């Protein structure tokens, strides 16, 4: 990536030499060029030709793979992200360009934000709820002189996005589009009183969903289907395996933890590990589990899939894999999850997967495990089981 601060070789995480997707896009380049003063005259409240002063506390929210904080490392920025993978990519990219460890402060969306923010840069997330949650958390730290700039591709920035900035921080407008990217320019209004945050969101599940019938679900902002039970999970809950006491079960890509909690309620003697790369998701899973008073033993871990789980140590893996990475459709994440499951399962251990019928998971699992069985299916979803031989 070429920026006004120089060139940087960047990669996603985990690094894969076959990966064709870049670790930055035109919206990152647009924002960095703007910050360097290329469009400084268009900043609200600043005279034409005056460069943006990057003094004080610079906070970068939603940096996809660390491109922004790597470019701005000399200014000691603070990164706030919901993604473990993005955080690991940032560490690797900073090390690659020779940045001293600790020069950039890495926070998660669950950590308290800095008490004062002088420059706020926001990479617009896919989830409008996550954007709302983060702006509400950051608003008390923003002051009248804070430079607030958002960025994203044109297809990611909507009227609802601009309204959020305006409702929470102050008057907002957009830039012209450049290489299908756009900037959001916001002038903080200290007299504005942000609304109360609706997050985390709690609701009771309906009847007919097995052990979770009538149970409480807790969702932090940004978790998939935060305001209702998605139909894929509902289908999975109707076809979960019978787990025995003492077995080790992993809810892989746990989201709000509904599936793992259902297993723990049905068999309190099982040991359940909830794993997700989203800090918001793992917080949701733990709160869902605690809210239902499950008597068993559980562990909650933010990480890169099953990395760190010993080989041949798990009896059952339950998985509803994503097939998107931000705006990109890909089966790379699902394939890594399946491969990780095969490694950690004991001989005779089972991987249970739910997914859209068109994704072809039965064939993928046969290639990896040498077997797969269709447990259940309807017009839209299938539940597939593969056994480690």
Image (spheres, rainbow, N blue to C red):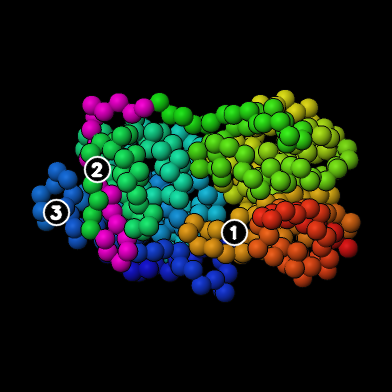
Say few, some or many: other residues with alpha carbon within 10 Å of mark 3 (under 14 / 14 to 19 / 20 or more). some
Label 1: which secondary element: loop
Q: Which residue is mark 2?
A: 172
* Residue lying at 78% horizontally and 38% vertically, measured from the top left: 263
Say few, some or many: other residues with alpha carbon within 10 Å of mark 2 (under 14 / 14 to 19 / 20 or more). some
Say few, some or many: other residues with alpha carbon within 10 Å of mark 1 (under 14 / 14 to 19 / 20 or more). some
Q: Which residue is mark 1?
A: 323
Q: State the predominant SS element of the stretch in magenta.
A: loop
What's the distance in space between the residues labelled 1 and 2, CA to CA?
A: 33 Å
Q: N-terminal of the two: label 3 or label 1?
A: 3
* Residue 41, disc: 3
Residue 302 place in picture, x, y as percent: 62, 45
Please identify the quadrant where the N terminus is shown.
bottom left
As drawn, is 167 to the left or to the right of 270? left
As drawn, is 352 to the left or to the right of 39? right
What's the distance in space between the residues labelled 3 and 1, CA to CA?
A: 41 Å
What's the distance in space between the residues labelled 2 and 3, CA to CA?
A: 16 Å
Q: N-terminal of the two: label 1 or label 2?
A: 2
Residue 245 place in picture, x, y as percent: 88, 37
Label 2: which secondary element: strand
Contact flag, marks 2 and 3 (Cβ < 8 Å): no
User: Magenta residues?
Assistant: 177-195
């Amino acid at each position: 990536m070429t920026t006004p601060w120089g060139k940087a070789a960047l990669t996603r995480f985990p690094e894969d030499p076959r990966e064709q997707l870049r670790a930055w896009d035109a919206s990152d380049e647009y924002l960095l060029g703007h910050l360097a003063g290329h469009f400084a005259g268009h900043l609200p409240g600043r005279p034409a030709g005056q460069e943006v002063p990057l003094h004080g506390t610079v906070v970068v929210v939603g940096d996809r793979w660390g491109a922004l904080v790597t470019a701005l490392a000399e200014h000691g920025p603070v990164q706030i992200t919901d993604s473990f993978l993005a955080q690991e990519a940032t560490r690797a990219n900073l090390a690659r360009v020779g940045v001293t460890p600790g020069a950039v402060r890495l926070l998660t969306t669950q950590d308290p934000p800095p008490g004062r923010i002088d420059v706020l840069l926001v990479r617009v997330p896919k989830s409008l709820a996550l954007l709302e949650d983060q702006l509400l958390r950051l608003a008390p730290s923003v002051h009248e002189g804070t430079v607030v700039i958002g960025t994203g591709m044109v297809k990611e920035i909507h009227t609802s996005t601009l309204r959020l900035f305006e409702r929470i921080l102050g008057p907002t407008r957009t830039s012209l589009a450049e290489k299908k990217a756009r900037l959001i320019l916001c002038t903080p209004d200290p007299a504005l009183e942000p609304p109360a945050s609706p997050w985390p969101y709690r609701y009771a599940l309906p009847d007919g969903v097995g052990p979770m019938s009538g149970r409480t679900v807790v969702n932090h902002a940004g978790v998939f289907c935060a305001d209702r039970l998605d139909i894929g999970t509902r289908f999975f809950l109707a076809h979960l395996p019978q787990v025995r006491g003492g077995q080790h079960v992993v809810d892989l890509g746990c989201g709000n933890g509904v599936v793992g909690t259902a297993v723990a309620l049905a068999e309190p003697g099982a040991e359940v590990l909830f794993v997700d790369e989203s800090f918001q998701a793992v917080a949701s899973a733990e709160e869902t589990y605690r809210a239902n008073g499950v008597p068993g033993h559980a562990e909650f871990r933010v990480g890169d899939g099953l990395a760190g789980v010993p080989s041949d140590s798990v009896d059952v893996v339950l998985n509803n894999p994503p097939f998107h990475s931000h705006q990109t459709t890909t089966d790379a994440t699902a394939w890594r999850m399946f491969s990780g499951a095969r490694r950690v399962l004991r001989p005779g251990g089972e991987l249970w997967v739910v997914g859209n019928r068109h994704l072809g998971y039965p064939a993928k699992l046969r290639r990896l495990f040498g077997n797969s069985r269709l447990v259940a299916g309807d017009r839209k979803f299938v539940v597939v089981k593969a056994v480690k031989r």
